[in-house]
Amino acid sequence: MQNVNSNRVFKRNKKEPNTEGEYVLYWMQINRRFQYNYALEYAVGWANKLNKPLLIYEGLNCEYPWASDRVHHFMMQGMQENLEIARKKQLNYHSYLEDAKGAGKGLLYQLVENASCLITDEYPVFIMREHNERVSQKVDIPYITVDSNGIIPLGLTEKDPYSAYFFRKIMQKNFLECYTHPPKKDPLRDLENNNSIQLTEDFLKKYPSAEKPLKNKKSFISNLPIRHDISVLEIQGTRQSALGKLGQFINYGLLDYDEKRNDPDENKTSGLSPWLHFGKISEYEIVNAVLDHQPKGWDLDSISYNNGSTGGFFNGDPNIDGFLDEVITWREVGFHFAHHRPDYAEFESLPDWALETLKKHASDPRDYVYSFEELEQSKTHDEIWNAAQTQLREEGIIHNYLRMLWGKKVMQWTPDPRTALDYLIELNNLYAIDGRDPNSYSGIFWCFGRFDRAWQERPIFGKTRYMTSDSTRKKVKLKQYLKKYGNQQTLDV
Ligand SMILES: Cc1cc2nc3c(=O)[nH]c(=O)nc-3n(C[C@H](O)[C@H](O)[C@H](O)COP(=O)(O)OP(=O)(O)OC[C@H]3O[C@@H](n4cnc5c(N)ncnc54)[C@H](O)[C@@H]3O)c2cc1C
């Protein structure tokens, strides 16, 4: 990767691959797809250079934070799809599902014993961040993480972007170069050494293929030491579903996005965040598909740097331009922030002005204070908030506009901002299928001032942005939404 994409490669333990070892190992941690995947492409590149076969490992343990039936089931659907693809393409692919706490311990290190190098996904939050820091120090072979998360490589920014405007400037300066160095659609087509890799019987006995449990997901999951009260969703965690969702959005939502995206009743956003989170679809292919729908005559030459402003950059259909700002700028600002800030999940990571104003107002009297359990079960006096929380609990997602209100209200109804932050992280990451993502922390911390500016000072919120359910009711179409998720649980006051 000798171009802008070299900024995607992180040689974690500074070791260089050499010809020792039987195979190149790719550990698929978060970008769980065979297509448009820079890390897989990089692993294929090393396999070819060293004339080795490639072993792809995809696993799922049961001890990750907020582990639940919901997350497990969604991920297992994706793993089943990958297993079928791997079989069809005769890939060297091992998938493993831990069936008891600690059962998978040592698996990766055993695979490493015969590997020339270990290539895996760069990801700035959650357990992947910890894995990449910890495992890279424990293995003797090169440990290389490759960023396949967005259009602008993580290594291109020098520090954490403090605002979307600041990041948008960087994005606008670099978009064309990055976009025109895309990941390959099918990197495995280039793999030259297709020799089969035989894992030992001992290994397979200890860490058997996931094939069997994947056929009996529900019964397998029911025996795991994870949360069983977070229900399985109707949506499917497969790449095929992600592509279907993208097609549906392009046909029925994209050209109404600007006007209707904030209306919960309209359902005009893409709904792609769950699949983006688990890497079943790449941001590049979304951007590529969407740009194909710019008006006739539009091409990449229409793009002009606009000093970080939202409009006047893509210079195409305003709906498409608006969507691209969300999926590129707003999605990626959080990845770049977390990449530079190990404290991305800490209250203290907020900007100084926000810390100051929130501390000043921390003990302002609150009209309502709810416990975590009351919030979790949608038991507040506020119909719109309850509906949003019910959607989160039952469907693993909240409509974007309401997600902002949802966060803001928890700030207002908890004893202090730190408690609000803890509750929001817990509710979001436990129930949201797109949770535990850099965007989870962007969205939640945005409620407390991250990436935002100071507004007029008010009780409780201080100078952070203020939102109310009354103004939301006036501003967006909610009738059907409230009919579907609302009312049942509202407390009389
Ligand atoms: C309190 C709070 C919590 C949030 N938690 C999460 C979370 O856990 N996971 C998550 O992916 N997003 C989160 N968001 C951001 C945003 O709400 C979702 O990304 C968006 O609603 C997903 O719906 P969609 O795919 O239909 O979005 P679309 O409008 O179709 O946008 C396409 C994609 O662009 C990105 N995007 C859109 N809006 C935003 C935004 N405001 N910030 C960052 N990226 C954005 C997402 O990747 C999204 O999938 C949170 C926002 C708030 C205010």
Image (spheres, rainbow, N blue to C red):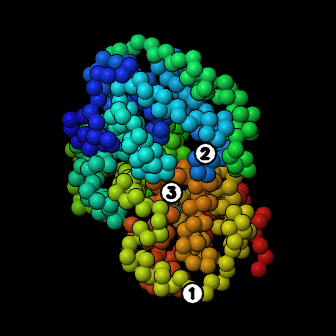
Q: Are marks 2 and 1 in contact (CB under 8 Å)?
A: no
Query: Which one is earlier in the sequence, the residue at label 2 or at label 1?
Result: 2
The residue carrying mark 1 has its beta carbon less than 8 Å from ligand 1: no
* Amino acid tagged 2: Glu
In the rendered view of the protein, which quadrant contains the N terminus? Answer: top left
Which residue: 64% across, 41% down?
Answer: 101
Of the numbered discs in the image, which one, if any, rests on residue 63? 2
Q: Is residue 285 left or right of residue 441?
A: left
Tell which tag, 2 or 3, sits nearer the viewer: 2
Q: Which residue is mark 1?
A: 364
Judging depth in this view, the residue of 216 and 247 nearest the camera is: 216
Residue 15 image offset from top left, x and y in percent? 28, 36
Q: Mark 2 and mark 3: span between their CA atoms?
A: 20 Å
Q: Residues within 10 Å of mark 1 (few under 14, many from 20)?
A: some
> CA gap, disc 3 to disc 1?
27 Å
Label 3 CB-ligand 1 distance < 8 A? yes
Question: Residue 22, located in which quarter of the rendered image?
Answer: top left
Q: Which residue is mark 3?
A: 440
Q: Spot the residue most to the top.
A: 195
Residue positioned 45% across, 49% down in the render: 130
For label 1, the SS is: loop
